[in-house]
Image (spheres, rainbow, N blue to C red):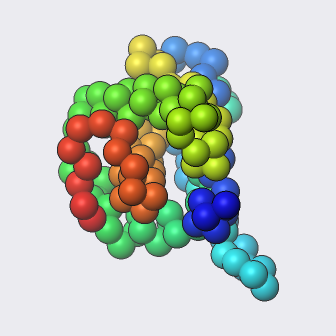
């Protein structure tokens, strides 16, 4: 029940349909204020909607703007390797709801390393994983930067 208080919602979806070599990403930030809370939504999609990532987590947008490393700080190969590592562990935890909180790990992430998602998608996934680990005191593997 305590976890319900800390997490308003995490929806993180990747739908991979194509192995095209170049995908351009568009990022849209939607923030809506209600009487009880503020929800941050980050949506990433390419022009032909071959994939889509939606991140809904209170505070992620402001954390990304204030604490994340700037774009191009890490190489694309670094981001892809870390994302694969984090997503693999995430998916393992989704499949073990009796061991890991189903409130934190709600659904699997379809991240396939042979698909080129582009820098922007990998940058946002990586930073969400860092944000998630620091905010919810989780460790998905390896060193987690404390930002």
Farthest residue to the bottom: give it: 35
Farthest residue to the right: give it: 35
Q: Nearer the viewer, residue 31 or 82?
A: 82
Q: Position of residue 121 (x, y in %)?
A: 46, 40
Residue at image coords 21%, 51%: 73
Q: Position of residue 59 (x, y in %)?
A: 52, 69
Residue at image coords 57%, 29%: 96
Q: Quadrant of residue 68?
A: bottom left
Q: Quadrant of the C terminus?
A: bottom left
Residue at image coords 67%, 75%: 38
Q: Image check: 127 left or right of 57?
A: left
Residue 22 visible in rendering: no
Q: Nearer the viewer, residue 44 or 84?
A: 84
Where is 113 relative to 125, above or below?
above
Q: Where is residue 51 in the image (x, y as percent from the top left)?
A: 62, 30
Q: Where is residue 94 in the image (x, y as percent from the top left)?
A: 58, 32
Farthest residue to the front: give it: 98
Q: In which quarter of the image is residue 109?
A: top right
Q: Image check: 31 left or right of 36?
A: left
Q: Quadrant of the N terminus?
A: bottom right
Residue 36 visible in rendering: yes
Q: Image check: 144 left or right of 28?
A: left
Where is 145 relative to 100, above or below?
below
Where is 130 relative to 65, above or below?
above
Residue at image coords 58%, 45%: 101
Q: Which of 24 and 60 is in front in this view?
A: 60
Q: Quadrant of residue 126?
A: top left
Badge count: 0
Q: Image check: 107 left or right of 73?
A: right
């Amino acid at each position: 029940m305590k976890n319900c208080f800390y997490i308003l919602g995490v929806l993180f979806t990747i739908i991979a349909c194509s192995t095209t070599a170049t995908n351009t990403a568009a990022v849209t930030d939607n923030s809506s204020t209600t009487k009880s809370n503020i929800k941050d939504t980050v949506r990433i999609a390419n022009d032909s909607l071959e994939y889509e990532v939606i991140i809904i987590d209170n505070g992620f947008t402001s954390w990304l703007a204030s604490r994340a490393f700037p774009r191009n700080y890490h190489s694309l190969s670094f981001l892809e390797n870390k994302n694969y590592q984090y997503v693999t562990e995430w998916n393992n935890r989704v499949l073990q709801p009796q061991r890991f909180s189903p409130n934190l790990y709600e659904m699997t992430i379809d991240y396939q390393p042979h698909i080129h998602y582009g820098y922007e998608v990998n940058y946002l996934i990586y930073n969400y994983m860092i944000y998630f680990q620091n905010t919810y005191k989780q460790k998905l593997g390896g060193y987690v930067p404390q930002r």
